[in-house]
Amino acid sequence: MTELHALDQSDLEARVKDMYERVALAPEADYHFETGRGLAEHLGYPSVDLDEVPGPAIDSFAGVGYFLDLASIASGERVLDLGSGSGMDSFLAALACGPTGEVIGVDMTTAQLAKAKRLADEAGMHHVTFLEGYIEDALVEDGSVDCVVSNGVINLSPDKPAVFRAAAAALRRGGRLAIADIVSARHLPQGITCDASLWAACIGGAAQRDDYLGAIRDAGFEVVEVRDNDYRFISDQALGATTTYGVSSISVLATKN
């Protein structure tokens, strides 16, 4: 994984919280990335599924790929959503697992959590719980989860191996990790990896693709499928990194050994 020599992690956390608070409260504003239903449909989310979840959660969707088909969530399963945001993926997982299942979303951004909790209450989705915390600490008992999902969030962590270890610990043996995230074709230079503003924009924290998949395997997973996503950044700064360093989105399915 990329070495972090001078990244101010406190600054990074503050910037990430600020950006995604704005995504929760003002999803129509301009960001380095797209948001909302148009993005979700472009990435492959079926419209018929989106029609079944709260609209405001979709408005604040800022994911980078579709992976729920890989997750294959079944009725009665327990699902952990790392970096759950305003809850769109959590709500879709809740529809898949049904009222006999359970979904636990973990996020560190107060405004996102408040919005997700309110929407869950309004929708009567009582089998969805949102917890304040960090994705490096899954906040559930070891071996208690059938599937871990995450969308565009692990790249924001300065300790990605810790995230994958936490996911592995949460999963039962044979459990599934289904995620979408940002990676790079080439290692990013220190000038980018030490820039907290670029991390918050989902660029500076992009691990080199092979290193990223290696960290998943090192945590005790078998990588089953990797596919490229048609994801696009929209700011000039982000587009420049995409062109120069091959920053792109992938969806991954892995199973716990």
Image (cartoon, grey):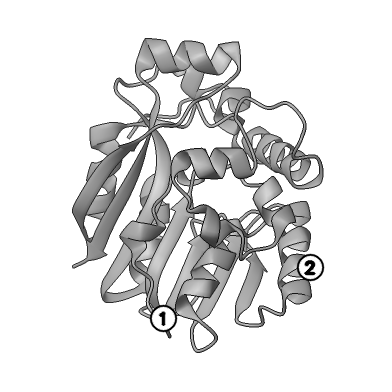
> Where does label 2 land, which residue?
118
Identify which residue, 56 or 240, lies in the foreground.
56
Does residue 41 sit above or below 162 in this rendering?
above
Mark 1 → mark 2, Cα distance in angstroms: 23 Å
Q: Quadrant of residue 245?
A: top left
Q: Is disc 2 placed on a helix, strand or loop?
A: helix
* Residue at the (54%, 44%) spot, across then down: 40
Q: Is residue 204 left or right of residue 32?
A: left
- Which numbered tag is attached to residue 77? 1
Tell me which corner region of the image, top left, top right, bottom left or bottom right, holds residue 12.
top right
Screen quadrant of the N terminus: top left
- Dot 2 alpha-carbon crowd within 10 angstroms: few under 14, some 14 to 19, many 20 or more: few
Amino acid carrying mark 2 in the image: Arg
Q: Position of residue 124 (x, y in %)?
A: 72, 80
Q: Is residue 98 above or below residue 166?
A: below
Q: Position of residue 148 (x, y in %)?
A: 41, 65
201 to 42, vertically: above or below: above
The image quadrant where one finds the C terminus is bottom left
Residue at the image point whose x is 48% and y is 68% from the top: 80
Q: In the image, is 25 to the left or to the right of 36?
A: right
